[in-house]
Image: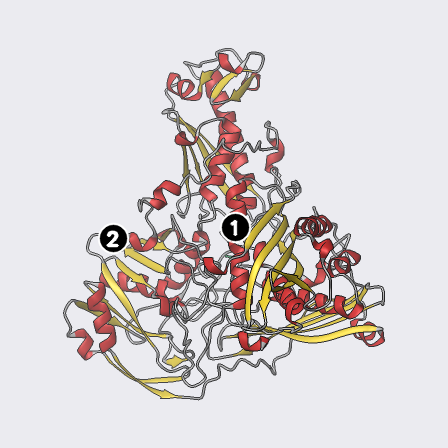
Amino acid sequence: MPIASSTLPPRMTLEPGSRQPRIDGQLKVTGTAIYTSDHNLPGMLYAVPVCATIASGTITNLDTARALSMPGVKAVYHHGNIGPLFRTAPAQGFSGILDERRPPFEDETVRYYGQYVAAVVALTFEQATAAANAVKVTYKAAPHDVSTHLSTDEKPTVDTHRGDPDKAFADAPHKLDQTYATPAETHNPIELHASVADFDGQTFTLYETSQAVVNHQNVMAQMLGVPQENVRVISRFLGSGFGGKLWPWPHCLIAAAASRDLRRPVKLVVTRDMMFQNVGHRPRTQQRIRLAATPQGKLTAILHDSLNHTSLLDDYSEGCSEATGFLYSVPNLRATSGLARRNIGTPTSMRGPGAVPGLFALESAMDELAIQLKLDPVQLRLLNEADKDETNNLPFSSRHLPECLKTGAEKFGWSRYTPAVGSMKKDGLTLGWGMAACTWIAVRMEAAASFEFTNDGTVRVATATQDIGTGTYTVLANIVLDRTGVPHDRIHVVLGDTNLPAGAISGGSWATASTIPAVLDAIDKAQGLLFQIATTAPTASFPGQKPDALAFTDGRVHLKTQPAATGIPFADVLKKANVRAATGDGKSNGTFGEKDPRFSTHSFGAHFVEVTWQPEIARLRVSRIVTVIDAGRILNPRPARNQIEGAVVMGIGMALFEETHYDPRSGAPINNNLADYILATNADVADLDVTFLDYPDLHLNALGARGVGEIGLAGIAAAITNAVHHATGIRVRELPVKIEDLL
Ligand code: MOS
């Protein structure tokens, strides 16, 4: 690893108060942070798509005459005139990825409700909207299927297999066989998806709501049919994405193709209702879990067969067994997955894809097994602790699940748990207690970064990753502060632009872990160059010295043998030598998809949940949640805790509220707005207590950080439904829990 050459200690000192929690906070709360749809370019036009009103069929006529005659309208694009848009070659690593592979308007077949069938471009948004409503589309409708019961004729994929699970299950003295379901869920970041495309005759400058500008550039270049260097993608600030903004969607191509044709900048903002149709969602899952165990509670077999819906055209697999193979020690295991095709837009990754629905099923089943065996659910998990990853026989780089379970139990007061349903009361309410384990993959992606000491006394760190709102700007500033002693007001962090060194996706909870090594390497290289300048320039600050006789402390270059206070500020070293900047290019290799990995790298955790239940009025509330997370070293405690808290709140939504309903008659997502698609609000949020174990995972990077964006959502829904069962005696195996389930 490049960081091995680091001359600096591999630990960040975390002194609360020594750093700002958010270097971008002021920009955001004052409205100075420019989000994608805030870009207003000279001569800019507005594009508004026309969405199909059937879920399956063909377009027989598209009458644009009236729309074209309306004020301000510049063009109406459709199958006949969008111009060349190509399909991408199969993805290579983290390049060329998109979930809905068909370019917009490629054919005249409608495969899901809301599919873009045309787009109007006009001088104003209002004119474009009015004209879009005036485009008359005639269809020949065909039967569609948006049904929620999933079955498939396609052959399932075996995701992981060991031992003889069928025999072990058949022979087991204790077994459980249940099916769990999670609904389609729609990402609802506050910031709408948007594209502002500007084609100058040669180069596309694309302002995008993208969690991955480098991939976005590659996909757009392929689909627009231009060399990659003719596409620049910019995504400076994001109002979150939850995975929905990882890969490009058709609207990006519509904006770019319109700008290409009209030679003017074009803005397209995806409306909230379109966000329920055209930019992915977490698909419905249906998961059969079979567990077999000895009377003492040792697991002898796990069978996990999952299905998820996907679109007619694209094979999006949710990967529900992501965690099943390694979370517990079990000699016999098989996990399979299959796809059921529906007339719904293509699904995509949503916060904790795979593990989140998968652990709802597995951790519900573990609770049911504990009850069957009359074992404490915490104890059942401790009994089945895995001391290596049994899917690949690799050691874990760092795994502290038992400590998460024990610490959580201790903080929650689990020793007072009485297992009988409805047996715990407080203030006239019935209490339900439940718990679940969680895990999420940790990897490092290949990344590059540059770092610059500048003669005006500032430093600059740059990489083409993004800050989706989680605090990437701040974490990088803090690393620079710790490594160089240069204060925050002299640190520039530049992200979200493909002109910068290629950086990591803001996904998978990998951005921090991937970016750190590249940034540390860049700082080291820049410092080496600075020492060279300080010793070898004609007007060197340390003439006659060797570069390696120098050290860098708190912004000053000094002789190792002398105290830092005697040093010369780096700006003066550069000025004296008449050099503008000392720049280092840093790199880190990736661990994702490594040929010969040495370790299995994952984060772990545990949730403990208390619900209150009033059977007289069927009132269920989540009152208290204790979460303990083992995610390596925590670099910036407050935003890290916010990530887990936010995920836990999202988990309350997953357990109790969130569900996208597709109307069986029209195929339309009918609760396509923030009033009818119910999310957890402040009033639904329990007392949250988040603890980090903070064991550095030094196999992953020099600071030992793994990432905290997703793990908090894994397992939490099961912990809640386990608590619901404890309070009510009702086992809800299909999310979300509805009042009518509990009557
Ligand atoms: Mo996350 S679903 O990888 O943005």
Residue 28 seen in the figure: yes
User: What residue is disc 2 on?
Assistant: 40
Q: CA distance from mark 1 to mark 2?
A: 32 Å
- Considering depth in this image, is 406 or 647 the residue closer to the camera? 406
In this view, 405 is above or below 519: below
Observer-nearest residue: 740 or 713?
A: 740
| Picture mark count | 2
- The answer to whether 275 appears left or right of 544 in the picture is left
Quarter residue 734 falls in: bottom right
Of the pair 104 and 656, the residue shown nearer to us: 656
Residue drawn where x is 54% and y is 74% of the image: 739
Q: Residue 266's spot in the image, x, y percent?
A: 26, 60
- Counting residues from the start of the chain, the first of labels 1 and 2 encountered is 2
Q: Residue 80 location, x and y as percent? A: 29, 76
Q: Amino acid at mark 1?
A: Gln
Q: Secondary structure at mark 2?
A: loop
Categorize mark 2 by other alpha carbons within 10 Å: few (<14), some (14-19), many (20+): few
Looking at the rendered structure, the kind of residue marked 2 is: Asn
At horizontal 50% and vertical 14% (from top left) the residue drawn is 565
Vertical placement of residue 184 versus 696, above or below: below
Secondary structure found at label 1: helix
Q: Which residue is mark 1?
A: 643
- Nearest to viewer (mark 1 / mark 2): 1
Q: Quadrant of residue 581?
A: top left
Q: Residue furthest front?
A: 428
Give whichever of 596, 379 is nearer the camera. Answer: 379
Q: Quadrant of the C terminus?
A: bottom right
Q: Residue 561 placed where, x, y %?
A: 58, 12
Q: Position of residue 13 (x, y in %)?
A: 57, 31
Say whether residue 320 is visible: no
